[in-house]
Amino acid sequence: MEKYKRAAVIALLACLLYAGWRFAYTRMFLREAYAADGQTIDAEITVAGYPRESAYGYVVDGRMLGVSAAVYLDPPGDGGYDPAALKPGDVVTGGFRVKAGYIYGRHLTASQREPVAVTPVKSIPLQHRPLQWAEALRGRIDGLFSPRQAAFLRGLLTGDTSRFSEPLRDGLFRSGMSHVAAVSGLHISMLAGFLMLIVRRRGWAAAVCLPVIFLYAAAVGFPASAVRAALMYACFLLAPLLGRQYSAVRALLFAAAAILLVNPYAVQDAGFQLSFASVLGLTLFAGPLARFFMDAPVLRRLPEPAKRAAAPACAASLSALVFSAPVAAVTFDGVSLAGPLANILLLWIVNLIFLLAFGALALSLLWWPAAYIAAYPARWLLEAYLWAIDRIARVPFAALYTSNALLTAWLLFAYACLLTGFFRKTWKLPAAYAAVALLLTVGLTLWHETRFALTVTVLDVGQGQCVIVRSEGRTAVIDCGGNRQNPGRIAARHLQSLGETRIDYLLLTHAHQDHAGGVPDLLALMPVGQTLLPLTEEIAASPPPFDYTPVTEPQSFSLGAAQIGLITADWMPGANEQCMAVVVRYGDVSFVTTGDMDAASERWLLRAAEFPQHGVLLAGHHGSRTSGGEEWLEALRPQAVAVSAGRNPYGHPSPETLERFEAAGAEVYITRELGHITVRIPRQRG
């Protein structure tokens, strides 16, 4: 007990010391930068990285007002410069809109508001040379490997994930392998291990490895995970030379103190949190769990060499999740359940890919044809690894998402079991309880969804619209667009959290960004049977970037126990009004959405078709004042109205429209206030 009290006192003192240093750091170094928050100023920015493409131009790291900044630049225009050609050390001057706040390792965000001037440097400054080497390495990766392979290798070798496709990013997350693209202890240990094979004398190890691993950390931009790994490995190498015994806990605390001394705001980085949480779990639990697996019945029958290899691998995979899983759940809204098994099966392949790719890239410095031939084993392993990641990601419930309350409750129960095992020094019963509870939770999730004949969920995608309709194992998605994160990913993860692996119908009311902007990502993440879209003049002139079946006439079809009807108004004037209305019916219950149609279009719909009453209405045009007319509401008499709207400059939903909904006797639900809105209809008897 005294040990725990002493640890609590030390932790309290450390927190107080950190709070004091953060306050002093802010006052000393950030006052001028934060005073510019919300202003447009003439600024001089020193480029500290290479530009990356963004949604509206380019983004590059830089130093502005004495602090780190993410600088957003317009695409090439008449300014006489190409932002893609910027390099570290160049100076950019011009008018920028400044937003203060620490995010992704930068204290400021600067957005170009006026034409800028660039003063290029003749040679890249010495402190930025590692970045130049990393950029050259990425160029050689592109030359030796296919685009898909190169995108992954850029992440594995340099931490650059800017070219990751949505399926690759999602596949790595669901399989629990995202850490391979965040330069950390895995990469440092592989690099150092490769060097140790060359330098066999332990006395020379520190002299050779330390400069290389710190240059490697500099080349990838000094992320917190890489700095933590480099500092801990330095402690490991230097401890015998100094006559000290290496302690992983002390090395971890030293690395944390060093990073926070340089930048106390680094504790807010997800990379810092995940890296330190994973290593802390490994340090505290890997040993006990390894001993547990050595005696586990599953591994007991294995040959001794295989058991000695499998037990530590299982222990490392699980112990790394002890503290990192809650961080991932909060940061990324989910945790991979397949991660421990995937890491056991595939991590050795990552080690081989790392070494083989580095060897081929090093050979490319001497003779390119030989390097191209030497890269063949790495290419083959890369394809095998990416294929395995894709298959694991498709397994139902491969990942736990916080949108599923039952699975979140299981995660809390699993931690209770873990604490019980830790304090009672026994793991068999807690592990059995957690495993049985997981099976029951998955079973309850599937059973709960089969209790209802129809489930309609209006997803919170910000200012946009995305609706999921499920009935008897069949799924339809109505629209997929919005400005909250990635609407395609939100829809896919919601379905995956329920064990769904495909979509039968994707129904788009129209092709505007707030209704269809997330469709390409959704199509990449989940297979879709058929995509239906009204054929308007706008769509005919500028087809969307995905395959679809045009809808020109009213039609209906079954979705499980429900009936779906489509009514197009592609001839209406105005791009917003040229939409497709979708009517979902089950017995005497209905759900109606009209896209962005206005009151005039609603009146036409009433003449064109018969609409059910007393159902659920999704407010047209996100609750705009021009939609939800009195005639429309009088005809439908909805019991409830859902409004899909987020933060926006248009005033959606309009107060007068909300008043009309309430006057019609409907209960109003808004995604901006409530998040996802779900309507479940039980089976009707008879």
Image: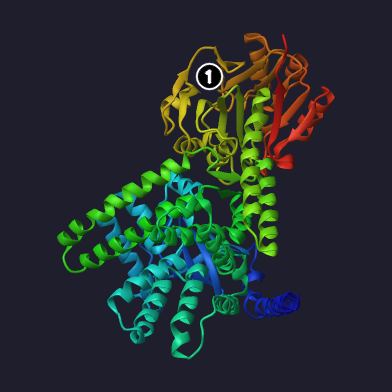
Q: Is residue 167 above or below residue 235?
A: above
Give the residue number, with chain letter if any, for mark 1. 570
Give the residue drawn at x 59%, y 77%: 253
Give the residue drawn at x 80%, y 25%: 666
Q: Quadrant of residue 668?
A: top right
Could you tell me the amino acid type at mark 1? Answer: Asp
> Measured from the top left, where is residue 148 in percent x and y?
34, 48
Say which quadrant the N terminus sits in: bottom right
Q: Is residue 627 above or below residue 435?
A: above
**Is 544 in front, or is 152?**
152
> Measured from the top left, where is residue 161 in percent x and y?
43, 56
Q: Quadrant of residue 669?
A: top right
Q: Secondary structure at mark 1?
A: loop
**Is 526 in front, or is 397?**
397
The answer to whether residue 383 of the structure is visible from this angle is: yes
**Is 460 in front, or is 363?**
363
> Measured from the top left, where is residue 244 in percent x and y?
51, 88
Q: Is residue 121 above or below residue 629?
A: below
